[in-house]
Image (spheres, helix red, strand yellow):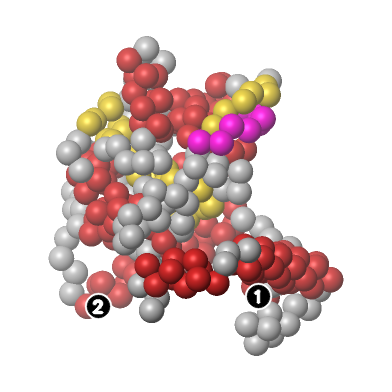
Amino acid sequence: MPKRVLLSGNEAVATALRQINPDVFPAFPITPSTEIPQYFSNYVSNGLVDTEFITVESEHSSMSAAIGASAAGARALTATSSAGLAFMWEVLGVAASSRLPIALTAVCRALTGPLNINCDHSDTMGAKDSGWIQIYAENNQEAYDNMVMAYNIAENKDVRLPIMICQDGFITSHAVNDMEILDDMTVKDFVGEYEPEDYLLNPNETFAVGPYAVSDYYMESRKAQAHAMENAKQYFELTEEEKDAILRHMWPLTPVPPSTRAGYAVTFADKMCCLEETKATVKRYAAVPGHLLFAQTAERGKF
C-alpha cells in the first residue's frame, strides 16, 4: 500500500532507485545532486540493494562507465548537475546513438560563469538535442514518480533511448514535501527485470557499440533516434488545451495567440506574474537613495 512520507526531492529519487535496484551506479559528487549517490551508497552498505556502486574520478568517467555497463547488458544509471553534466556532453551522444536505455538523474543547476550553485536549467537545456529523453519534475512527488517510470519508458523496444529525470536544484532537491511513495513490491513489479535485446556479453550474437559511421549510416542512425523519440510520446498524453497553454502562453511574443480559455488563463497568469516581479524590482530600487544606487551600479561595472 502507498504511504505518506516527508522526503526531500533527492531522497525521493534515491528511494525510487532503491526500489528499482539497478545493476550498476557509477557516481561522482557535485552539488546539488551529491545527496542522491550519498543516500544510495548507504543502501549499498546496508545491503538494501545489490547494485554495483562505482566511485569514479569524474563525471565524464561516470557516464562512460554507465555506457559500458549498459552496453554489456546491465541496467545502469548515474547522477549529476551543472558543470558535471557539461563534462559528460562528449559521451551523451554515444549513449543515445548506441540506443542504450541509461537513466540519468539530473538536479538542475546554473552552469559556471559566474559561479552559482542555485537552480537554472542551462545545464539540461544544453543537452536537450543530445538524443536523450528529458522529463522535468515540478515537485518532489513528480521527481519520485518520474524516476519510477524512467526505465519502463527508456527500455521499451520501440524507444530504447537514454532518459534524464530532471528536478530543480534546492527548490525540490533539498526542500522537504509531504508525498506518497509506493511499496517496494509494487515498484519492483512495475519496473520488471531488464531484458536487453543486444548486448556485448551475449555469446550468441556479434554486437558493436560506437562504431564509425559514414554519412549515410550516420543520418540513418539520427533518423532512427528521432522516430524513437516520437514513440516515447505515447507515455505523455496532452489534451489540446494543455498543448495550447504550453505552446502559446508567451503571446504576444509568440505570433499566434491561444485558442482556448485555458490557454488565455495561463497567458494572463504569466503576464500578471511578470508584472508583479517588475513592480517588486522597481519598488526595491526606488527605496535606495540615488547616490547609493549609482555607486552600487558603478561597482558592478555598469558604468
- Residue 110 at x, y = what percent? 40, 56
For residue 216, the mark is 2
| Kind of residue sitting beneath label 1 | Met
Q: Residue at x 39, y 72 (%)?
A: 298
Mark 1–mark 2 distance (CA, rounded to whole Å): 39 Å
- Residue 209 at x, y = what percent? 21, 53
Can the viewer see residue 63 in this picture? Answer: yes
Residue of label 1: 250
252 lies left or right of 293: right
Name the N-terminal-most of marks 1 and 2.
Answer: 2
- Which image quadrant for residue 2? top right
Q: Nearer the viewer, residue 221 or 66?
A: 66
Is most of the magenta stretch helix, strand or loop?
Answer: strand
Q: Residue at x 52, y 60 (%)?
A: 231
Q: Does the segment drawn in magenta span residue 90? A: no
| Kind of residue sitting beneath label 2 | Asp
- Which image quadrant for residue 176? top right
Q: Nearer the viewer, residue 221 or 172?
A: 172
In the image, which residues are magenta? Answer: 174-181
Q: Residue at x 24, y 42 (%)?
A: 62
Q: Does the segment drawn in magenta span residue 178? A: yes
User: Callout 1 environment at 10 Å: few (<14), some (14 to 19), or many (20+)?
Assistant: some
- Residue 276 at x, y = what percent? 71, 65
- Residue 153 at x, y = what percent? 50, 48
Give the residue at the far right of this rendering: 261
